[in-house]
Image (cartoon, rainbow, N blue to C red):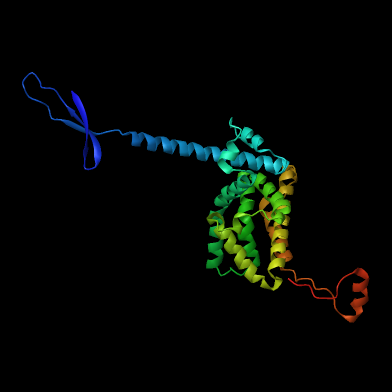
């Protein structure tokens, strides 16, 4: 039997030709598609890509846990690689370039997981005409994070978010909501609707209050996780109570510096300029 490879219809095929039988008849040629090096390359590429995704995920989860436990600045990238089981000391730099890139990857990974529930909550609020209801909008923003903690034990992400909110966001380190990230599309829309509902605050005061009630939420979740199980409030009851507090806090009327005649002496004594505060 002999084999030759030829092109038929633009595709490589193997033609196997059988030798003559003793009766002088020759069997029909058998034709089959050739295995090309390109087929092997595609398979190898897919395998390598799958391994790369798995490695990135391990690094992301290892970094999330270490950052939450020890602080972002205190963790070396090499420690992240070791915790993820990587023998290559430059594994983190290869996948994320630096610590800022790793932090963004953690946010992207988690926000992609939270997006479906946020989208569902947003769509339900729109259907029910509650797109201007402050409590409903806060629920869209924060309930997915609460579910991550309660259902999946994702307290590490909430701890990391708390560190970010208090230490890194004030420095200008961005979050997926600050850029056109598909993972945070429903998140951004809920914040846009809430900002419109509370437009009387002014943009700067609104941003400050949203971050403040976010810190309130994260603190409640972290404290809940830190208590012995027997001393914890039921998760659903705690979340609803915290949601009420957050709604009341973010809607509070903006404080105005007193300007009446009786307050001028007090303002001067306390070093407060007698002008209205601006949002």
Residue 212 percent across, percent down from the top left: 73, 59
Residue 238 percent across, percent down from the top left: 70, 54
The image quadrant of residue 231 is: top right
**Would residue 220 be visible to someone looking at this image?**
no
| Residue drawn where x is 73% and y is 65% of the image | 248
Q: Which of 174 and 57 lies nearest the eye of the viewer?
A: 174
Residue 175 percent across, percent down from the top left: 63, 54
Residue occupying the far top of the picture: 22
As displayed, is residue 200 above or below residue 231?
below
Q: Which of 155 and 229 lies nearest the eye of the viewer?
A: 155
In the picture, which quadrant includes the N terminus? top left
As displayed, is residue 103 above or below residue 259?
above
Residue occupying the far left of the picture: 23
Residue 164 percent across, percent down from the top left: 69, 51
Q: Which of 256 and 220 lies nearest the eye of the viewer?
A: 256
Q: Is residue 218 left or right of residue 50?
A: right
| Residue drawn where x is 82% and y is 76% of the image | 275
Residue occupying the far bottom of the picture: 261
As displayed, is residue 50 above or below residue 201?
above
**Would residue 189 be visible to someone looking at this image?**
yes
| Residue drawn where x is 67% and y is 45% of the image | 155
In the picture, which quadrant includes the C terminus? bottom right
Tell me how many marks there are. 0
């Amino acid at each position: 039997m002999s084999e030759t490879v030829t092109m038929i219809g633009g595709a490589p095929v193997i033609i196997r030709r059988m030798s003559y039988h003793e009766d002088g008849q020759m069997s029909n040629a058998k034709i089959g598609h050739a295995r090309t090096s390109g087929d092997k390359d595609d398979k190898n590429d897919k395998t390598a890509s799958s391994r790369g995704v798995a490695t990135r995920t391990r690094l992301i989860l290892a970094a999330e846990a270490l950052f939450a436990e020890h602080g972002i600045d205190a963790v070396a990238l090499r420690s992240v690689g070791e915790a993820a089981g990587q023998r290559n000391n430059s594994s983190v730099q290869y996948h994320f370039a630096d610590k800022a890139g790793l932090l963004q990857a953690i946010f992207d990974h988690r926000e992609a997981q939270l997006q479906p529930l946020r989208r569902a909550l947003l769509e339900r609020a729109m259907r029910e005409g509650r797109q201007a209801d402050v409590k409903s909008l806060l629920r869209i923003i924060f309930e997915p994070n609460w579910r991550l903690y309660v259902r999946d034990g994702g307290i590490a992400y909430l701890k990391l978010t708390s560190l970010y909110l208090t230490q890194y966001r004030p420095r200008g380190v961005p979050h997926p909501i600050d850029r056109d990230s598909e993972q945070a599309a429903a998140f951004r829309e809920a914040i846009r609707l809430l900002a419109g509902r509370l437009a009387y605050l002014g943009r700067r005061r609104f941003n400050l209050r949203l971050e403040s009630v976010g810190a309130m939420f994260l603190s409640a979740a972290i404290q809940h996780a830190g208590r012995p199980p027997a001393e914890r409030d039921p998760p659903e009851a705690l979340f609803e109570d915290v949601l009420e507090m957050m709604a009341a806090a973010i809607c509070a009327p903006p404080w105005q510096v007193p300007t009446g005649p009786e307050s001028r002496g007090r303002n001067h004594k306390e070093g407060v300029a007698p002008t209205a505060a601006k949002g």
